[in-house]
Image: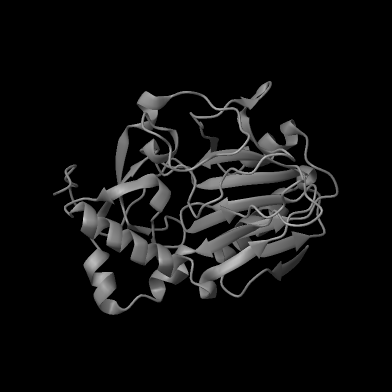
Amino acid sequence: MQVVDIAPAIGARISGMRIDRLGPDEFGKIMQVLLDRHVVCIDGREALNPDAHLSFARRLGTIAEYPFGKPLNGYPGIFRIVKERDSTSNFGGVWHTDSPYHAIPPAYTVLCGVDIPHHGGDTLVANMCAAYDALPADMKERIASLDGIFTASKVHGSGTPRFSIGDVQRIDNRSRADQTYIHPIVRTHPSTGRNGLYVSACHMTGIVGMSVLESDQLIKQLSQQIVDTRFVGRVRWTRGLLVVIDNRCVQHYALNDYHGQRREIHRVLVSDGIAPSRARQREASHAISH
């Protein structure tokens, strides 16, 4: 097993093992690298078949639902992320963390490269713990007890979506999309104890207790902090590459720079059953001031 960091602040690429034949010791080593580096990229010669993909994901936790897209036929846990050659928009082409619009958001995203462009199509990843660590003390104090209002409505809601999602097969689930969930914008990682920002601008409508203007300004400021180049790495896709992203502390962004080429990634979301939390819990108001 060889491990090479992909960037100073985040990510590691692992080679020298068969994903479909991992013993307990090898899997434990992968999990330790994931905790340390937040994103792991495991080399594979060919794309995993769906059964092997799901089998690996289940070792991380419980397969989580994705209520807005049709799954791969016969495999309800696998969602196909596709951009066809003649398309202009892609899925995930904005900085975000996956599906924070749940009471318990998925802890992990497990991606497998199926059809990869000859050039372009990389995924950027950003370390939200490192971004938090670098904040000045007064900002940390300001945001310590704040809660964000998370929803899928900007992408999948009853209004006009603000973000395109490419050539995926949608499920019209607007009543579900318009629901809102309250999570702390500084969350404590349940395995490492590290604090990190928990912000996903395309899935947020505000911050509890703040005006819309104040919320938008703070979300923008924190989002810019997260994607500072000091905290960002790049996943370079190859066919068969398996990528595990820790959604509890990572944002990611699928680059749309491969026009005229096809790209297909298979995605599985995994829950650890633990809701976002911070060291000191408080009862969250569900109202936003105007």
Give x and y (percent) for residue 212. 22, 52
Residue shown at the point (52%, 71%) measured from the top left: 231
Give x and y (percent) for residue 95. 50, 55
Q: Nearer the viewer, residue 191 or 203?
A: 203
Q: Is residue 120 above or below residue 267?
A: below
Left or right of residue 124: residue 263: right
Residue shown at the point (26%, 64%) measured from the top left: 143
Left or right of residue 241: residue 104: left
Give x and y (percent) for residue 107. 49, 47
Residue shown at the point (22%, 59%) measured from the top left: 214
Q: Is residue 132 above or below residue 46?
A: below
Visible residue check, residue 10: no
Residue shown at the point (64%, 64%) measured from the top left: 234
Tell me which corner region of the image, top left, top right, bottom left or bottom right, holds residue 38. bottom right
Give x and y (percent) for residue 57. 63, 40
Q: As drawn, which residue projects farthest toward the left?
A: 290
